[in-house]
Image: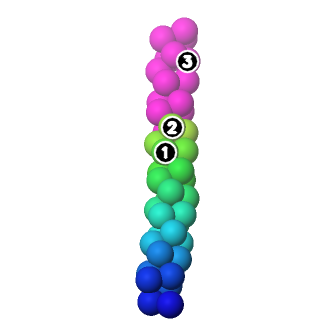
């Protein structure tokens, strides 16, 4: 039982970390796109 609980906990942890990573990547991508569009807008003007 102990091993099963440990593996389940590890699985939950992995899912949680993956979800956090996805949010981090999405936010950083959003910031990069914003900076890129701002830069191109400034250049076009």
- Callout in the foreground (2, 1): 1
Q: Residues within 10 Å of mark 2 (few under 14, many from 20)?
A: few
> Quick one: label 3 or label 1, which is nearer the N terminus?
1
Q: Residue at x 55, y 24 (%)?
A: 37
Q: Which mark is residue 25?
A: 1
The image shows residue 26 at horizontal and vertical percentages of 55, 45
Residue designated by label 2: 29
The image shows residue 2 at horizontal and vertical percentages of 44, 89
Q: CA distance from mark 3 to mark 1?
A: 24 Å
Q: Which mark is residue 41?
A: 3
Query: For the view shown, which residue lies furthest in the bottom direction?
Result: 1
Magenta stretch holds residue 36 = yes
Q: Which residues are magenta?
A: 31-45
Q: Residue at x 53, y 30 (%)?
A: 33
Q: Quadrant of residue 19?
A: bottom right
Residue 9 visible to the viewer: no
Q: Compare residues 31 and 2 and report the one nearer the observer.
A: 2
**Secondary structure of the residue carrying numbered label 2:** helix
Q: Compare residues 43 and 17 and report the one nearer the observer.
A: 17
């Amino acid at each position: 039982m102990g091993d099963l609980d440990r593996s389940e906990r590890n699985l939950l942890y992995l899912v949680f970390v993956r979800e956090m990573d996805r949010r981090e990547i999405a936010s950083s991508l959003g910031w990069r796109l914003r900076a890129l569009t701002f830069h191109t807008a400034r250049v076009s003007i």
